[in-house]
Image (cartoon, rainbow, N blue to C red):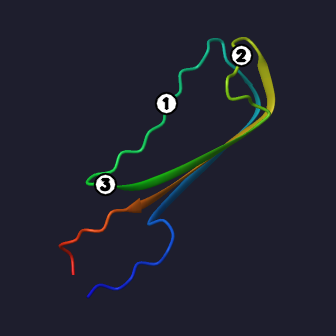
Amino acid sequence: MSAERPPGPDIEAGAEVRMKRVRFEEDPEVETSTHLEPGGKTRSESERENLPKQVEAGKTYRNARIRKQVEIRLQEDENQE
């Protein structure tokens, strides 16, 4: 009989970037992904301040902030005791 797992993620990771001033000369191409083997569940959340989701090339943004949080819940191995 296995012990019940506590609620919440097994792994949490986060990052925050603050910029006094940032300018994009071209439209950026941004991609993020999380890959789990053999499986599991992920949840991610991002938050922006003074920076729109779709930035404009050539525009300067000031006092911007981006925060990203990822939570991972690993899949239990049914063969473990």
Left or right for 36, reference 44: left
Q: Quadrant of residue 66?
A: top right
Q: Distance between the residues labelled 1 and 2?
A: 17 Å
The amino acid pointed to by label 1 is Glu
Question: Which of the two labelled residues, at mark 3 and mark 1, occupies the earlier sequence position?
Answer: 1
Q: Is residue 30 above or below residue 71?
A: above
The amino acid pointed to by label 3 is Gly
Question: Going 48% across and 65% down the picture, which residue do you hit?
Answer: 9
Given residues 9 and 20, the one toward you in this image is: 9
Question: Which of the two labelled residues, at mark 3 and mark 2, occupies the earlier sequence position?
Answer: 3
Given residues 15 and 42, the one toward you in this image is: 42
Q: Is residue 31 above or below residue 59?
A: below
Residue at mark 3: 39
Question: Going 39% across and 82% down the picture, which residue do you hit?
Answer: 4
Secondary structure under tag 1 reads loop
Q: Quadrant of the C terminus?
A: bottom left
Residue at mark 2: 56
Secondary structure under tag 3 reads loop
Q: Are marks 1 and 2 in contact (CB under 8 Å)?
A: no
